[in-house]
Each structure stands twice: as structure tokens, then as C-alpha cells.
């Protein structure tokens, strides 16, 4: 034992001193990157809390911003050009499901367990955090002022984002500014006080504090316990007095005319007086509510204290509408200018109007979707479990018919999100490789090896794909080995085994990968033409048409006479 103890200590110390794969992860050398004509643009360190933590998701917003989420509940926003940290936020719930964030030009929206967070995109200021009624089942979607959250796989709720606080100022009206008559120098005092504007954004509790001068109408109808219990003509009346209680001593029980016990009412110990109106008071004796009916008295002391609280409520988004679904919804909705499209685990696609949630389309698909659909310029691309890739016009169709632009038999699992560029779609899946599909016709142009199944990024000449072993492969984007096999030409490979966390870059040509220790690297093509990030992302929806301005009509010019032929 005297020999075994020191020996074990030496073995344990040597074992702990050995570098782990996470600790030994270093960026690939320049020589290794030369094989694929790549270079390291920058590196960044993401804070990792422990062995159970790690980078969970990398999401590219545009040429300027990168979102990184960790298993430990950290959101880090980086400068996509330099890797510098712009801002970060620590969520309350750790090791909860991590979904991609949604963003527009002003806000970033994220979900953490059952809480919805809204941040100012460029400062990280928390606009609001709101506790959702159910657990989200997919990533949120966001347009200009509404966020769409899929909850519990059964419903989608549209929440209106609170508007920014506008501080109005007293301005002279148009007539006064123009100096017309007696209105010259007049000031428009109809603008609200800025304090009122802030108060509306931060509403207080829902309590109503009465004054001693308030009074209520006298009792018009007497409702006793027997009439209410027997369901007579007055059974729908709410009790204006305590006459429904046979006893003024708690607990209060209600019986029918045969003496059968019906209900047991809540305690009336919070009632300050047994005469109308009933005044509720907090422990300090301050009056917090007056009511003519016992039915409006809070059922518990906790509710009374909540009503007595002087703390303002936090900002809460307003629910515009709620859509329920008999189909389990597992993917983030797709939003156009006027419609919201939803899909789930079953072979159905449904669309609703964003304004009034009127159902527009409920169409059956050949098979259930196998991955998150994507959209570009109002065309939705749906990878199906049977190996078909469908392009659907999201602005057309109605009833049981969705307008299918084309349908391509790509084959394979297709359980990866499609990558859409201006002229092609790159679709991958487990053990089925990556296929390049013509965006206009749906024709399959080329394929990679079956083991290379995860697209990372593309530029004008090369497509970067990761295989099952963690090897980065660079394929020629525009050429194939032969027309018959349509096999893509492999240009070079780079070992990225130490960086297992990668992302699908749908916005630029940069390659992002992270190690288990939180080391994030950004790779790019060495060619000078790619020194600046190349944008490949397309807008989700086409811009709304701007109505043409009407040409003013000169009253001195006579209108043209109508053509008799028309």
C-alpha cells in the first residue's frame, strides 16, 4: 500500500495533465488551409462555464453581426468582420433547448425556456422580457413590428412589439407656422405630456383605487341564496350584497331549498365592512379597492397584496391573435408581407392572413417536411421526408391548393435546412450528400459524396461542405466531373475535427466553426476578391410596391376627350 499510493498519485497527475481534445483545439495552420485556398480571418473566445457547457448555435445575421448561443444560457453578439464582442446577455435558464434568434433591422428576439426576450439589436438593451403561457416548440419569426411564436406545437401567437418612446414637443400648427391671420404664433397644446407617454408604456397594476367621494348605485334586486341556488330567473345576477351568505361567520356555505350543500365560498375576512360598498384595505389600513359586489373581491390575500403593490408592471407585448392547429407545429413560421405560413410533422401546409388570421391555404403535401423550410423573395422551399424538394409561391394559392412553382426529386434524407442563393439551392441530408438544384427549374445540377452532407458556406466559385468525419471539403461550384454522374469536383480538404460546432451561413461566404472550449474561428477564401464579405443572402419577401404618385392636374388645361373607339 505504501508503494501503490504514490504510484496512483503519479498516474492520476499525469492523466490530468494530458491535453483534452477541447483544450488542444487550435486554428488550422496556414499550410493546412492552403489545400483549400483558405485563410484564417480572425479568432474569438466564447466564455464557457464548465465541462457541461459549450457552443450550441452559431447564426450569421449579415456582413456585420454574428449571434452565438451556448448551452449555459449565454448569448454573445460578435462583429462578423473582426470577431470583436458587441454585447452579450446571460439568460436565467441553463441547459434549456436552444433555438435560433429572430431579428430585423432594430430588434433581436430570443426564447429561453418559457420567456420571450427582445433586445435592441446594436446595443443589447433589453426592450422587454415576457413570460409565455406555454413552452415554445420552435424558433420565433419576426417581421417589422410583430413576432410570431409557436408554442406547445399547437398554436402560433402574434405579439406586437412595443413601439419606441416618442417624446412629443409643443409645435406651432401649420397655419401658425405659415403666419395666416390671427393664428400666427398660436401653439398646438393638444400634444400629450411626455410623462403620460412614458406612463402608458410602463403601466401600473390593474387595481382601481377609489376615493371616499365615490358611490355606487343602490341595490335594485335582492338575490338570496335560495333563488341563486335553484337556478331561477335571477340566477345569472351577480351578488350586489352579502345576502347570499346564510351566515356572516366563515366559512360561508350555500345550500339549495332542500338543504343540500352546494358550494363553499371564499373567506370574506378581507372585507372591511359588511355594508355597501365593500372596502378592501391592506395591512397598513390604506384603502386599495371599493366594490359593490362580493364577486369581484380577490380570492386570496396574495391577490390583495398584488393589487396593493405600487411597483409598475414591466413592458408586455400585446397579443394580436392566436391560431390553434390540430397539426403539431415544429418549425418556425414563414412570413411574407401579408401571410404567415406554418408546417409541422404532418404533410400539410397552412397559411393565414397576418392582419385578421383568416385562413387562406390548407394544402396537403406529398410528405411531411424533414427540416426547417426557408424562403427567398416570397418563394418557400420545403424539403420533404420522401426526398422531394418543393418550391411554393407564398403569395399565391388558396383553399386546398398551394401554388407549386416546381418539385424536384433530389433524394436522400434531406433533413438539413436548404441554402438559397441567387441561382441555386443547396440541399443536404444524413448520408445522402449535398445536391445543387437550379433555383429556376428545380433540376439537380451536381452532387457531392454521400458522406459530405452538411453545407457550411458558398462563394462565386466554391461550395464548402463538411463530412461525417469533420473534414472540410471544397467543391467546384460550377463544374462536374462528367454530365452522366453529375459528381461535383473536389478541390481540396481541411481537417476541422477539433471544431465540431459549425453553422449554415445563409448570408455571406464566411466559414464559422467553434471548438468545445469556445474557440471560434472565421475562415475565408484567400483570393483578394473575397477580402470583403460576399453577401449571398436574399430578402425573405419582395418589397411592397410603392403606389405611383398621381400627376397633379392643371385646372387651366382641359381634360382630354375620350376615344370613341374605346
Image (cartoon, rainbow, N blue to C red):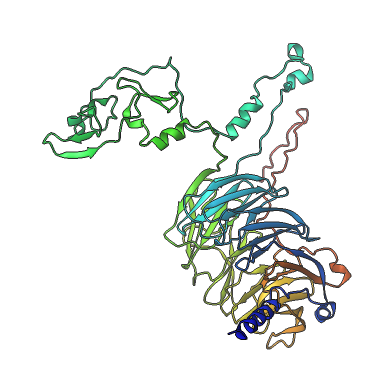
Outermost residue toward the front in this view: 2
**Could you tell me residue 253's position as x and y percent?**
21, 35
Q: Is residue 437 visible?
A: no
Residue 257 lies left or right of residue 340; in this view the side is left
Residue 69 lies left or right of residue 401; in this view the side is right
Q: In this view, does 478 lie above or below 133?
A: below
Q: Residue at x 72, y 47 (%)?
A: 123
Given residues 132 and 412, the one toward you in this image is: 132
Residue 399 lies left or right of residue 550; in this view the side is left
Q: Can residue 129 be seen in this view?
A: yes
Given residues 553 and 359, the one toward you in this image is: 359
Q: Residue at x 76, y 68 (%)?
A: 521
**Could you tell me residue 254's position as x and y percent?**
20, 35
Q: Which residue is drawn at 27% across and 36% down?
A: 265
**Could you tell me residue 283's position as x and y percent?**
42, 28
Label tally:
0
Outermost residue toward the left in this view: 258
**Could you tell me residue 26's position as x and y percent?**
76, 74
Given residues 493 and 236, the one toward you in this image is: 493
Q: In which quarter of the image is residue 20?
A: bottom right
Q: Which residue is drawn at 77% across and 20% down?
A: 177
Outermost residue toward the right in this view: 528
Q: In this view, does 37 lie above or below 403?
A: below
Q: Is residue 89 above or below residue 209?
A: below
Quarter in which the N terminus is drawn: bottom right
Quarter in which the C terminus is drawn: top right
Residue 523 lies left or right of residue 99; in this view the side is right
Amino acid at each position: 500500500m505504501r508503494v501503490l499510493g504514490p504510484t496512483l498519485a503519479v498516474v492520476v497527475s499525469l492523466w490530468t495533465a494530458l491535453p483534452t481534445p477541447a483544450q488542444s483545439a487550435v486554428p488550422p495552420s496556414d499550410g493546412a488551409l492552403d489545400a483549400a485556398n483558405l485563410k484564417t480571418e480572425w479568432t474569438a473566445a466564447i466564455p464557457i462555464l464548465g465541462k457541461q457547457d459549450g457552443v450550441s448555435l452559431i447564426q450569421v445575421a449579415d456582413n456585420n453581426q454574428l449571434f452565438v448561443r451556448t448551452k449555459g444560457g449565454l448569448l454573445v453578439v460578435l462583429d462578423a468582420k473582426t470577431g470583436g464582442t458587441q454585447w452579450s446577455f446571460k439568460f436565467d435558464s441553463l441547459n434549456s433547448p436552444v433555438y435560433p434568434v429572430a431579428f430585423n433591422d432594430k430588434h433581436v428576439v430570443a426564447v429561453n425556456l418559457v420567456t420571450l426576450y427582445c433586445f435592441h439589436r446594436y446595443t443589447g438593451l433589453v426592450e422587454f422580457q415576457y413570460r409565455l403561457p406555454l413552452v415554445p416548440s420552435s424558433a420565433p419569426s419576426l417581421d417589422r413590428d410583430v413576432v410570431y411564436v409557436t408554442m406547445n406545437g399547437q398554436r402560433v401567437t402574434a405579439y406586437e412589439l412595443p413601439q419606441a418612446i416618442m417624446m412629443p414637443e409643443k409645435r406651432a400648427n401649420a397655419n401658425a407656422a405659415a403666419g395666416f391671420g390671427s393664428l400666427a404664433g398660436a401653439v398646438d397644446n393638444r400634444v400629450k405630456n411626455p410623462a403620460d407617454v412614458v406612463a402608458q408604456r410602463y403601466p401600473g397594476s390593474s387595481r382601481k383605487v377609489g376615493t371616499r367621494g365615490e358611490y355606487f348605485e343602490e341595490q335594485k334586486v335582492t338575490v338570496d341564496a335560495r333563488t341563486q341556488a335553484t337556478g331561477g330567473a335571477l340566477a345569472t345576477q351577480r351578488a350586489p350584497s352579502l345576502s347570499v351568505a346564510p351566515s356572516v361567520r366563515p366559512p360561508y356555505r350555500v345550500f339549495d331549498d332542500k338543504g343540500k350543500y352546494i358550494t363553499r365560498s371564499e373567506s370574506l375576512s378581507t372585507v372591511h365592512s359588511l355594508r355597501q360598498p365593500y372596502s378592501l384595505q391592506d395591512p397598513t389600513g390604506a384603502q386599495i379597492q371599493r366594490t359593490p359586489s362580493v364577486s369581484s373581491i380577490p380570492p386570496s390575500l396574495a391577490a390583495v397584496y398584488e393589487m396593493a403593490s405600487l411597483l409598475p408592471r414591466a413592458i408586455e407585448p400585446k397579443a394580436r391573435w392566436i391560431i390553434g392547429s390540430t397539426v403539431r407545429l415544429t418549425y418556425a413560421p414563414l412570413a411574407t408581407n401579408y401571410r404567415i405560413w406554418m408546417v409541422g410533422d404532418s404533410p400539410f401546409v397552412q397559411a393565414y392572413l397576418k392582419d385578421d388570421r383568416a385562413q387562406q391555404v390548407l394544402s396537403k403535401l406529398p410528405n411531411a417536411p424533414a427540416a426547417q423550410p426557408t424562403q427567398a423573395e416570397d418563394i418557400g422551399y420545403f424539403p420533404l421526408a420522401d426526398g422531394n424538394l418543393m418550391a411554393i409561391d407564398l403569395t399565391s394559392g388558396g383553399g386546398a391548393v398551394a401554388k407549386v412553382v416546381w418539385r424536384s426529386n433530389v433524394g436522400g434524407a434531406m433533413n438539413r435546412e436548404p441554402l438559397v442563393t441567387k441561382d441555386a439551392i443547396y440541399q443536404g441530408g444524413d448520408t445522402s450528400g449535398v445536391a445543387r438544384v437550379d433555383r429556376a427549374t428545380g433540376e439537380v445540377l451536381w452532387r457531392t459524396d454521400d458522406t459530405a452532407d452538411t453545407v457550411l458556406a458558398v462563394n462565386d466559385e466554391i461550395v464548402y461542405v463538411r463530412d461525417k468525419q469533420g473534414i472540410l471539403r471544397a467543391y467546384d461550384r460550377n463544374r462536374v466531373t462528367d454530365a452522366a454522374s453529375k459528381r461535383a469536383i473536389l478541390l481540396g480538404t481541411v481537417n476541422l475535427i477539433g471544431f465540431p460546432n459549425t453553422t449554415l451561413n445563409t448570408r455571406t461566404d464566411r466559414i464559422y466553426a467553434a471548438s468545445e472550449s469556445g474557440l471560434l474561428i472565421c475562415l475565408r477564401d484567400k483570393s483578394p476578391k473575397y477580402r470583403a464579405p460576399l453577401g449571398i443572402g436574399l430578402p425573405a419577401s419582395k418589397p411592397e410596391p410603392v403606389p405611383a404618385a398621381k400627376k397633379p392636374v392643371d385646372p387651366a388645361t382641359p381634360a382630354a376627350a375620350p376615344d370613341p373607339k374605346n
